Image: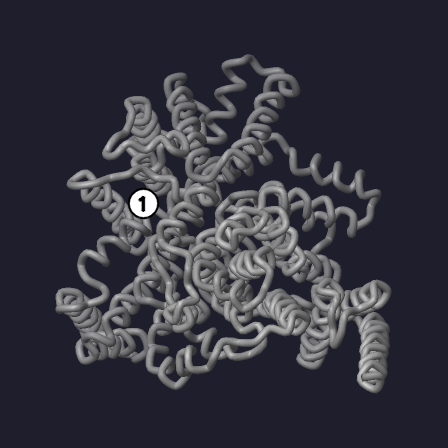
């Protein structure tokens, strides 16, 4: 959901027994160092409530526009970005460490008000601009307004997201100016005019108001707000307790808990760094005390938290975005995401298990673990997620409506254990509203009953979702959306520059030339582009950039559309654990007190599935369940899991006993062959894995006999 509850301190039963030694102050320090979104202005007193009030109102504005407004595009999207500029400059200072309490310097007021005014100028003059854009009658002062708006957005993106994405955008803007000035031979004014119009005013064909911002305004922000409410239900704690209950007692239990809990929490949060810090503050100290090396413990948490972004059914909100980009139902996206996600987390799970066996590590004492039967009573916390996925998958409701209803469910379940009767009445009313065919005059009162029940629970004593928490969730939803919306706007700039200059075909030609016609080499170059462009960029904005710049390259090379989008999405995400800018790994290393680069390399090794699987489904889309039969799906699942086991064992260097380097090569190649969905490679892979297993068994028996 691309939201982060940075102040949330998670506890598990083992932590309560003394395993947790990473305090809140240390968590905040790590977040500020590795997560740009944590370096925000400091507001206190009435100023704090005023700023939070603006943010909460913006969230309500987004929900209203998404659900009810039928505005022109030139009203809807500029008002969305104008609001983002207001809340953005209220949140982010000019650089890290420049945070005076209740203070905004004069130049930030100018940037904020001038930038917002530029976009609101478009809103006020939308009808006139719609006509004049078609006739190319944009006035000189409107060109200047466009430049101000572009600059203000770029500066906000620098503050909220970072320099790398700005460098990429700068290169493309520079090329667009070069294109008009030296290829089209236009004057300086006409060059600037064409670029400003294309990037600032146009809704179709790229630019700030292009597809990334449109999708962000229609869907992503509502899901971000939903994520902010979901966090306040306590679902993250439920996920951690559930993981402890399921696997905590087994060998190397804390690492396995980290894999499962981080996959579940990361799926919802949509933030690799934020999830690494919040769940890692619990799991990493536990892993170290169990006996894992510090760099390995930090790497496990970083790799699992990053993988949460590819975990269906939410995928950090990217699943909804991909469905819109590719033009397929949401259910189609999550169905195809299942097997790659299973392989990713299976690889990490196997690696931590083999590491535990190699080191002879034990699990957590059962008496310190949550009791599974008691956790079942808290499973109602999953109801908002279940409802959201069902409504979106059914296709009978818009994604915005599904998110809004899911927010209402989240408010109900948050207070269910404190006010069960009222919450049950509200939930029942909502379920009847959604799933029973009733006349309109009956349905509306049901919805009103649900709303009244939710509000009533909030004002009860000891409520979890109080009016203050509700207000805070709205404000934090807006705050969490700033970096995503700013990055989506810049992604639109990149896409607009590519569109107006025809650069896409030149990039494709260059990659084909460099690869000498080899699809595999072209995939490799695309992977490098995705990793570089994805460094430090939020998940949803990351995918917007990849879909605009890299996916078209693969589609032109003959890769199926859905496979191309999955390929670029995966490699954009793993930028968070890939050196040299591996922010999630560096955050994990700070908690583990381990060398950052060692942690990053360990995380990359653990996440080998994310580096291998995309090549396989790009070359043979059967792994994405494209053009396959049910029997073939079963074969693909079984052979791929066995294959990832072989790769994990090779990288770890241990099976039943330490592996000889030659055997590591053999079992690794065998595993890779089995992950390729074809019969011949499966047979060869099975033979290679079986040979290593037999050799290990014989060696173990000889060693036992000698003892």
Residue 608 visible in rendering: yes
Write the residue at 54% across / 69% down. 290
Write the residue at 48% across / 44% down. 34
Secondary element type, mark 1: loop
Residue 560 in which image quadrant: bottom right
Whether 453 is drawn above or below 67: the answer is below
Image coordinates of residue 188 in percent, x first then y, are 54, 13
Write the residue at 60% across / 52% down. 599
Near mark 1 (Cα within 10 A), the count class, few <14, some 14-19 or many ≥20, is few
Residue 133 in which image quadrant: top left
Colour convention: one colour
Instruction: Identify the residue under disc 1.
Output: 71
User: In the picture provided, is 269 more to the left or to the right than 570?
Assistant: left
Whether 616 is drawn above or below 162: the answer is below
**In what quadrant of the picture does the C terminus appear?**
bottom right
Count of marks placed on residues: 1
**In what quadrant of the picture does the N terminus appear?**
bottom left
Image coordinates of residue 4 in percent, x first then y, are 39, 53
Image coordinates of residue 604 in percent, x first then y, are 64, 54
Q: Who is closer to the viewer here, 454 or 33?
A: 33
Residue 336 visible in rendering: no
Q: Who is closer to the viewer here, 186 or 456?
A: 456
Image coordinates of residue 394 in percent, x first then y, are 44, 71
Residue furthest front as drawn: 707
Q: Who is closer to the viewer here, 518 or 29?
A: 29
């Amino acid at each position: 959901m691309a939201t982060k509850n940075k102040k949330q301190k998670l506890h598990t039963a083992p932590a309560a027994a003394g395993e947790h030694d990473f305090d809140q102050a240390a968590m905040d320090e790590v977040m500020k160092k590795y997560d740009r979104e944590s370096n925000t202005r400091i507001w206190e007193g009435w100023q704090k409530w005023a700023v939070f009030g603006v943010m909460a109102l913006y969230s309500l504005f987004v929900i209203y526009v998404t659900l009810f407004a039928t505005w022109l595009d030139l009203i809807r999207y500029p008002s969305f970005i104008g609001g983002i500029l207001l809340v953005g400059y209220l949140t982010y200072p000019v650089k890290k460490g420049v945070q005076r309490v209740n203070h905004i310097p004069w130049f930030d007021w100018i940037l904020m008000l001038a930038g917002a005014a530029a976009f609101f100028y478009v809103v006020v003059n939308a009808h006139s601009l719609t006509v004049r854009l078609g006739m190319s009658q944009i006035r000189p002062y409107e060109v200047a307004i466009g430049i101000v708006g572009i600059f203000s957005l770029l500066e906000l993106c620098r503050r909220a997201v970072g320099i790398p994405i700005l460098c990429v955008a700068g290169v493309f803007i520079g090329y667009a100016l070069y294109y008009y000035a030296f290829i089209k031979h236009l004057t300086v004014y006409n060059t600037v005019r064409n670029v400003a119009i294309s990037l600032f005013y146009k809704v179709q064909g790229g630019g700030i108001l292009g597809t990334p911002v449109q999708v962000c305004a229609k869907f992503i922000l509502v899901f971000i707000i939903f994520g902010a409410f979901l966090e306040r239900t306590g679902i993250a704690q439920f996920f951690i307790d559930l993981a402890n209950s399921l696997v905590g007692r087994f060998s190397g239990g804390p690492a396995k808990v980290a894999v499962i809990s981080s996959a579940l929490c990361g799926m919802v949060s949509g933030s690799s760094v934020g999830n690494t810090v919040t769940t890692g503050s619990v799991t990493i100290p536990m892993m170290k005390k169990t006996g894992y090396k510090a760099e390995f413990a930090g790497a496990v948490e970083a790799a699992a938290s990053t993988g949460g972004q590819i975990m269906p059914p939410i995928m950090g909100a990217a699943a909804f975005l991909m469905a819109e980009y590719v033009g397929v139902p949401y259910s189609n996206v999550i169905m195809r995401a299942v097997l790659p996600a299973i392989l990713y987390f299976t690889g990490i799970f196997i690696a931590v298990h083999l590491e535990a066996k190699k080191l002879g590590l034990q699990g957590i004492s059962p008496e310190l673990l949550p009791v599974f039967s008691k956790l079942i009573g808290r499973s109602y916390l999953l109801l908002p997620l279940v409802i959201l996925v069902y409504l979106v998958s059914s296709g009978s409701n818009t994604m915005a409506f599904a998110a809004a209803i899911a927010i209402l469910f989240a408010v109900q379940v948050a207070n269910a254990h404190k006010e069960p009767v009222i919450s049950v009445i509200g939930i029942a009313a909502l379920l009847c509203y959604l799933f029973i065919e009733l006349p309109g005059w009956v349905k509306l009162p049901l919805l009103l009953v649900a709303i009244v029940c939710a509000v009533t629970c909030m004002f009860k004593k000891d409520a979890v979702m109080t009016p203050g928490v509700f207000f805070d969730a709205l404000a934090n939803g807006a705050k969490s959306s700033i970096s995503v919306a700013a990055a989506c706007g810049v992604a639109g700039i990149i896409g607009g520059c590519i569109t107006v200059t025809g650069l896409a075909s030149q990039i494709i030609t260059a990659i084909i030339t460099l690869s000498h016609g080899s699809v595999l080499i072209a995939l490799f170059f695309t992977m490098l582009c995705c990793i570089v462009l994805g460094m430090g960029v939020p998940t949803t904005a990351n995918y917007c950039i990849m879909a605009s710049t890299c996916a078209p390259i693969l589609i032109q090379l003959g890769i199926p559309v859905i496979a191309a989008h999955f390929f670029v999405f995966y490699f954009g995400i793993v930028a968070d654990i890939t050196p040299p800018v591996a922010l999630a790994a560096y955050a994990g290393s700070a908690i583990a007190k381990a060398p950052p680069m060692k942690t990053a390399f360990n995380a990359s090794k653990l996440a080998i599935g994310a580096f291998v699987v995309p090549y396989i489904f790009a070359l043979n889309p059967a792994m994405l369940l494209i053009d396959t039969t049910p029997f073939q799906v079963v074969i693909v699942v079984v052979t791929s899991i066995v294959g990832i086991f072989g790769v994990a064992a090779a990288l770890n260097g241990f099976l039943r006993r330490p592996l000889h380097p030659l055997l590591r090569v053999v079992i690794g190649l065998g595993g890779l062959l089995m992950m390729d969905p074809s019969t011949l490679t499966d047979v060869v892979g099975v033979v290679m894995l079986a040979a290593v297993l037999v050799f290990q068994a014989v060696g173990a028996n000889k060693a036992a006999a000698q003892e």
